[in-house]
Image (cartoon, rainbow, N blue to C red):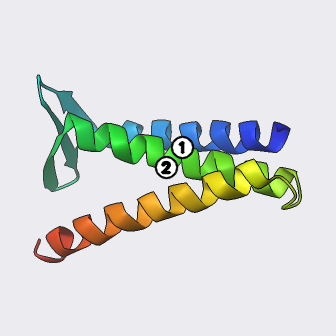
Amino acid sequence: MKTALVFLAGAILLLVLALWNLDVHFTNDTVDLHFYDTYFIVANSQVVLVIISFLGTLSSLGGVVGTRFRNKFFLIALMVFLLADAYILWTVYPILKNL
């Protein structure tokens, strides 16, 4: 369980460092991200889903590593979050390819 919390803290630290390099503006229903010379406008719901998926994946990965692959809850959570990550990338990647 400690390893899951360490991985979760590391994921939060990575998000904070990423946001430190971004110029972020919050509006009523969108989040505007300015990264160097690229400007992204993303819906709030998509940002929340990506952050939850990222944090859940790293936390469950930490739980799997910390229990040495013996805890079924963390294994199932890792599989669910990896499938969610794959779905998000599957739907976002064609959009990013056209940039």
Across and down, in percent, residue 23 comes to 24, 37
Q: Residue at x 58, y 44 (%)?
A: 11
Image quadrant for the C terminus?
bottom left
Compare residues 61 and 23 and report the one nearer the observer: 61
Q: Residue at x 15, y 56 (%)?
A: 37
Give the residue type that dot 2 points to: Phe
Give the residue type that dot 1 points to: Leu
Across and down, in percent, residue 62 comes to 74, 50
Check disc 1 and report its element: helix, strand or loop: helix
Would residue 33 appear left or right of 78 to someone viewing this image?
Answer: left
User: As displayed, is residue 20 above or below residue 59?
Assistant: above
Compare residues 70 and 52 and report the one nearer the observer: 70
Across and down, in percent, residue 15 comes to 47, 41
Compare residues 51 and 35 and report the one nearer the observer: 51
Image quadrant for the N terminus?
top right
Specify few, some or many for label 1: CA neighbours under 10 Å numbering under 14, 14-19, or 20 or more. many
Give the spatial CA distance, label 2 vs label 1. Answer: 4 Å
Q: Are marks 2 and 1 in contact (CB under 8 Å)?
A: yes
Quarter location, residue 20:
top left
Where is mark 2, residue-wise? 54
Check disc 2 and report its element: helix, strand or loop: helix
- Number of numbered discs: 2
Specify few, some or many for label 2: CA neighbours under 10 Å numbering under 14, 14-19, or 20 or more. some
Where is mark 1, residue-wise? 55
Q: Residue at x 56, y 45 (%)?
A: 56
Mark drawn on residue 12: none
In the displayed image of the protein, which residue is found farthest to the top? 28
Would residue 31 appear left or right of 2 to someone viewing this image?
Answer: left
Q: Residue at x 24, y 37 (%)?
A: 45
Compare residues 29 and 37 and report the one nearer the observer: 29
Across and down, in percent, residue 14 comes to 53, 45
Would residue 34 appear left or right of 84 to someone viewing this image?
Answer: left
